Image (tube, helix red, strand yellow):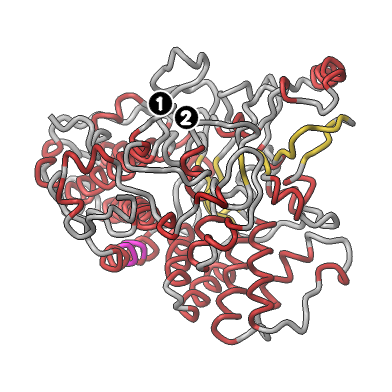
């Protein structure tokens, strides 16, 4: 039996989920795929179930992909020695630790869930593409959405593991469980083909009751990111300008407005996954009120403070609790995702974004740790612990402006690149003298981008990806000082990728054929 390999989450998982808005109907389980998809409704429910897997703790739920893209960089660390994030953040990961799962979060869980989506979307595409029981328009749109989701997952797979098993047809579990790794460049070609098809079909926007689905622009931003990683700067710039000039998205006047919990679908957000409170998945008795998977979000609780840790003057804890209660709030989080020591010390004091990224005083009480208030939700009534309705922001337009600035600088120098970085900096400072950049060399502008992306996109699951594609992860981490860990002593050149989990190697030795070192971990 292959119940623990990458195909643990095939279609039958869909019967366990209930979701809000466009996922509000329980997706149907597939017992016999060849006889399913009798109608458009059947196919759309299968797509809905695939979105549900994206919300698992191992991908976009709880810390999920943040675990890989933010921990171990120079922005986030826990406020205490926390075992479940330590292997990544402290660079002590190995094949065996990759299998250790805490609250359905591990390298192995992420591998399984990403490949579960690949497995599902291959079946959806195969069963829908030439299905005359579905009208041509909806049929093409469903295929486009499935191809986007497949491309998204393969993109994450290549970011995390590089060469990996790759297939786009319907295979049996036995066939797939013997696949060797495919060269990353070949996978990227397939990703781009899927993304370009998706962009040709997916809508520019969705009606309010469909928000949470990926539009054309979500596919476009991933394509632009791939071009940038390949250092195809002109292609990257062209795609960024297409988003800036042709999409309905716009920068908001202030940074704070972007993170307003009452306006989660604001015009700057390109793609955001919607969550709802009180909708749970598989119950975990060890964490009452929480779930392994479902449609309520854990993520704000990871950023919310714990009252037992605060305030700095412990004698004032009762007074802080009273002040919070008077506002209907509570410090009832975990404090496991706070601003790193390095990040807090270096964030410019005159930057208006600081107040949402470095919260070291709340309601007049000095705090022990600097928290990232942009992801907080302290409201007891609307957002209880481990049961939040906060959306999960995936992409936003400010990222695209900074991408355009970087592409222009790398392709042609800084002369025409200022126009893309300036709108981001202008809303981050009070005066032109503070935000204006001029007279920079190409290298000087490049370093300005390094910093600007750090301050603007902190905690949004971009930083480690950026440091790796810039080739500076090792240099940056070597010069970090953490509170509890020693990543500067532990990091090695191969830590730009993750190991394939041990159980996968044991069940499929072909995974070691092209690389017996498993990305350098053996």
The residue at 68%/64% (across/down) is: 451
Q: Is mark 2 on a helix, strand or loop?
A: loop
The alpha-carbon separation of the residues under discs 1 and 2 comes to 7 Å
Q: Reading the chain from its start, which is encountered first: label 1 or label 2?
A: 1
| Of 164 and 253, the residue lying toward us | 164
Residue 155 found in image quarter: bottom left
Q: Where is residue 24 in the image (x, y as percent from the top left)?
A: 43, 30
Is label 1 or label 2 in front?
2
The residue at 44%/72% (across/down) is: 227
The residue at 39%/30% (across/down) is: 101
| Of 173 and 445, the residue lying toward us | 445
The part of the chain drawn in magenta is 191-195
Q: Bin the neighbour count of mark 2 within 10 Å (Cα to Cα): few under 14, some 14-19, many 20 and up.
A: many
Q: Bin the neighbour count of mark 1 within 10 Å (Cα to Cα): few under 14, some 14-19, many 20 and up.
A: many
**In magenta stretch: residue 131:** no
Q: Is residue 479 left or right of residue 133?
A: right
- Which residue matches tag 2? 295
- Vertical side of 95 occupied by 428: above or below: below
Q: Is residue 306 left or right of residue 223?
A: right
């Amino acid at each position: 039996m292959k119940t623990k390999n990458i195909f643990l989450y095939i279609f039958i998982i869909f019967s366990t989920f209930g979701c809000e808005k466009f996922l509000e109907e329980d997706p149907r389980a597939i017992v016999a795929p060849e006889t399913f998809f009798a109608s458009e409704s059947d196919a759309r429910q299968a797509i809905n179930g695939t979105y549900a897997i994206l919300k698992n703790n191992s991908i976009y739920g709880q810390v999920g992909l943040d675990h890989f893209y933010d921990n171990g960089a120079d922005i986030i660390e826990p406020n205490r020695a926390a075992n479940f994030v330590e292997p990544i953040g402290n660079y002590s990961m190995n094949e065996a630790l990759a299998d250790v799962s805490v609250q359905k979060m591990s390298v192995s869980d992420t591998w399984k869930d990403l490949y579960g989506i690949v497995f599902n979307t291959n079946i959806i595409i195969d069963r829908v593409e030439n299905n005359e029981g579905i009208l041509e328009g909806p049929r093409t749109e469903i295929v486009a959405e499935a191809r986007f989701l497949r491309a998204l997952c393969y993109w994450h797979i290549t970011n995390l593991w590089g060469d990996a098993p790759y297939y786009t047809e319907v295979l049996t579990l036995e066939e797939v469980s013997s696949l060797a790794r495919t060269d990353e460049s070949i996978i990227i070609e397939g990703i781009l083909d899927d993304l370009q098809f998706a962009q040709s079909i997916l809508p520019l926007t969705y009606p309010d009751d469909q928000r949470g689905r990926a539009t054309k622009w979500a596919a476009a931003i991933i394509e632009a990111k791939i071009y940038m990683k390949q250092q195809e700067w002109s292609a990257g710039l062209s795609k960024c300008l297409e988003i800036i000039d042709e999409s309905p998205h716009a920068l908001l006047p202030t940074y704070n407005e972007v993170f307003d919990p009452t306006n989660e679908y604001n015009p700057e957000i390109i793609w955001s996954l919607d969550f709802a409170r009180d909708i749970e998945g598989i119950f975990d008795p060890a964490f009452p009120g929480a779930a392994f998977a479902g449609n309520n979000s854990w993520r704000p609780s990871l950023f919310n403070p714990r009252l037992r840790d605060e305030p700095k003057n412990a004698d004032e804890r009762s007074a802080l609790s009273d002040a919070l209660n008077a506002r209907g709030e509570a410090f009832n989080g975990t404090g496991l995702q706070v601003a790193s020591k390095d990040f807090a010390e270096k964030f410019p004091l005159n930057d208006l974004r600081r107040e949402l990224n470095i919260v070291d005083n709340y309601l007049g009480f000095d705090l022990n740790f600097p928290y990232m208030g942009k992801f907080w939700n302290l409201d007891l009534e609307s957002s209880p612990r481990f049961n939040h309705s906060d959306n999960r922001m995936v992409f936003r337009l400010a990222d695209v402006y900074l991408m355009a600035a970087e592409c222009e600088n790398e392709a042609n120098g800084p002369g025409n690149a200022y126009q893309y970085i300036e709108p981001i900096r202008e809303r981050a400072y009070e005066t032109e003298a503070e935000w204006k950049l001029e007279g920079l060399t190409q290298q000087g502008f490049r370093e300005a981008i390094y910093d600007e992306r750090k301050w603007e996109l902190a905690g949004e699951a971009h930083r480690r990806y950026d440091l790796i594609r810039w080739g500076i992860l090792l240099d940056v981490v070597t010069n970090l000082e953490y509170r509890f860990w020693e990543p500067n002593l532990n990091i090695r050149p191969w830590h730009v990728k993750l190991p394939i989990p041990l159980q996968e190697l044991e069940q499929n030795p072909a995974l070691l054929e092209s690389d017996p070192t498993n990305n350098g971990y053996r």
